[in-house]
Image: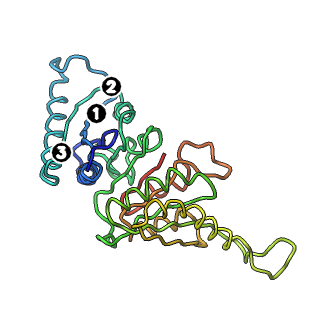
Amino acid sequence: MAAQEGVVLVGVDGSTASLAAVDWAATEAVSTGCELVICHAIPGGIQIRDRTEAPFTHLFARGERIVRVAARRARASAAGLQVSTEVISQGLPSAALLDQTVDARIAVVGSRGSGMFRGLLLGSTSQQVATHATCPVVVVHERPAPGASTAAPVTVGLDWCGHEPLLALAFDYADRHHRSLVAVHAYRITEPPQRPGRPGEPSVLPRAAEEMLADATAPWQQKYPDVPVHRQVLTQAPATALIQESARSALIVVGPRGHGGFAGLLLGSVSQHVLRHGRCPIAIAR
């Protein structure tokens, strides 16, 4: 496969979750023909100009060990993979990794780090990268979803607009990995839906949602004819629906923002919930 523009960037800190991210990123780099760049950011929020200056020597030595182990793991899982490593110190790890995303095709991080907050479902660095990166970001959990398999689909959550980046990422990934695609629109109802002014007549919302999914996916089905497509309209909270789908999906694709009253947020509430509680890798498309 011809190399594609950009690199696959993966941030590592030695944690189990970051090693799972390396595995995912290595597979992605092979399938896209991209170089894999393994990056470790020195923790502590400090800038270090001289690596030989005490007491920073041990921090760089540890960082070099972390990227060396990660690179060895990546090369073992993917023959012929081009891998480079970098240990950087530019303030906070999240800021250092964000600087690296400028030239990346996609950035990959583990869901939890190895620091004092490792018990959280989503580490602060992962959250910051997912929120502010200039490229798509995939957050990988340390354990695969119990329902995920080689036949598991790519699931993409669609709202009423802003489909293009999500579908571009989802169809491209599904095509390269020979998976089907499930397009999901979910909405919560608090009472039996009725058409305004016509009591007892079913709401047009489910039908409109089905038409929206069909219209949104049709051009991509023509571009990727080998990707089987299924569409689902679900009457439950969008975050809940996607989290449930993540237990049987290879990848969940969501957008960075919602399209309601909080559309101006850098990372919408649905995306945040799915990032924190999803069972499979979660992609934030841009």
Q: Amino acid at mark 1?
A: Ala
Residue under the point 59% across and 43% down: 265
Q: Earlier in the sequence, mark 3 or mark 1?
A: 1
The image shows residue 132, relative to residue 233, as above or below, that is above
Q: Which residue is mark 3?
A: 70
Residues at badges 1 and 2 in contact (C-beta under 8 Å)? yes
Mark 1 surroundings: few (<14), some (14-19) or many (≥20) residues within 10 A: many
Q: Amino acid at mark 2?
A: Gln
- The residue lying toward the viewer, choosing from 198 and 125, is 198
Residue under the point 68% across and 69% down: 208
Across and down, in percent, residue 125 comes to: 37, 41
Q: Image quadrant of residue 11?
A: top left
In this picture, residue 1 sits left or right of residue 274: left
Please tell me the numbered disc located at residue 90.
2
In this picture, residue 110 sits left or right of residue 225: left
Residue under the point 38% across and 54% down: 121
Mark 3 surroundings: few (<14), some (14-19) or many (≥20) residues within 10 A: many
Query: Helix, strand or loop at disc 2?
Result: loop
Query: Helix, strand or loop at disc 3?
Result: helix
Query: Helix, strand or loop at disc 1?
Result: strand
Q: Image quadrant of residue 65?
A: top left
In this picture, residue 81 sits left or right of residue 132: left
- The residue lying toward the viewer, choosing from 29 and 233, is 29
Q: Which residue is mark 1?
A: 41
Q: Image quadrant of residue 86?
A: top left
Across and down, in percent, residue 270 comes to: 54, 56
Residue under the point 21% across and 17% down: 50
Across and down, in percent, residue 254 comes to: 49, 55
Q: Amino acid at mark 3?
A: Ala
Across and down, in percent, residue 140 comes to: 33, 54
For discs 3 and 1, the disc positioned in front in the rendered view: 3
Please tell me the numbered disc located at residue 98.
none
